[in-house]
Amino acid sequence: MNINAIQADITRLKVDAVVNAANTSLLGGGGVDGAIHRAAGPELLTACKELGGCATGEAKLTDGFELPARYVIHTVGPVWKGGEQGEEALLASCYRQSLALAATVNADTVAFPSISTGVYRFPIQQAAAIAVSTVKTVLKKYPSVESVTFCCFSADELAVYNACLNQLTD
C-alpha cells in the first residue's frame, strides 16, 4: 500500500482515477471541480447530467474523457458548519465510497484533492487527518488499489498532508 502527497495540478496526473470534489449537481463549479470539468472537456458535463446529481458523502463514476486519468470519481464533501452536523463522518464516507468505486473499475492508482477544504471551509488539519486515516483503513479492504496520492494545491496544504502521513504507523 502506497499513500503519498504531492503538490501538483490534479488534472495533469497520469493515474487510473482522479477524484473530483464536486457539488451535489455534478455539473461543474469552482476550484478543483471547475478545473476537472474544463480539462476533461464537454463530454464530462454530458456524462454528469446523466447521473442525476450526487448526495453529500457519496460518489459516482464517469470516464475521464480528455484527462490523462481513465476515470473521474465525483464525490460531494460536506460544507463545514462547526463540526456538529456529522461533517467528519460525511467526509470519511467520501473517501470510502471513492475507493470502493475505484476498486470496481480496477483502478490501481487514485488521486484525491483535499475534499471540502476550499469553499466548503472544512478545517485543513481535521480534513487531512480524516483523509489519511480513512484511506489507510479502507485500502486494506481494496488491495487492488495499489497507490493513493493526495494532490495538494498549495505548499501549506502539502505540509499538512505530509505531517499526517508521517504520523501513520502500521
Image: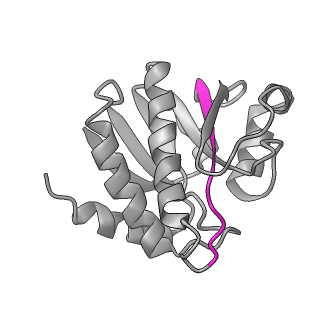
Q: Is residue 99 above or below residue 135?
A: above
Q: Position of residue 36 (x, y in %)?
A: 71, 43
Q: Read off the magenta span.
A: 70-81
For residue 3, say whether it is visible. Answer: no
Residue, x 45% and y 36% (percent of image)? 99
Q: Is residue 8 above or below residue 48?
A: below
Residue placed furthest toward the top: 105
Q: Position of residue 136 (x, y in %)?
A: 29, 48
Q: Quadrant of the N terminus?
A: top left
Residue 65, magenta (yes or no): no
Residue 75, magenta (yes or no): yes
Q: Is residue 103 above or below residue 164?
A: above
**Lateral position of residue 53 relative to residue 77, left or right:** right
Residue, x 43% and y 74% (percent of image)? 125
Q: How many marks?
A: 0
Residue placed furthest toward the bottom: 82
In the figure, residue 79 lies in which quadrant?
A: bottom right
Q: Position of residue 154 (x, y in %)?
A: 54, 67
Residue, x 31% and y 38% (percent of image)? 139
Figure colour scheme: one colour
Residue closest to the eye, 89 or 150: 89
Residue placed furthest toward the front: 85
**Lateral position of residue 78 relative to residue 145, left or right:** right
**Lateral position of residue 115 relative to residue 160, left or right:** right
For residue 79, say whether it is visible. Answer: yes
Residue, x 13% and y 51% (percent of image)? 170
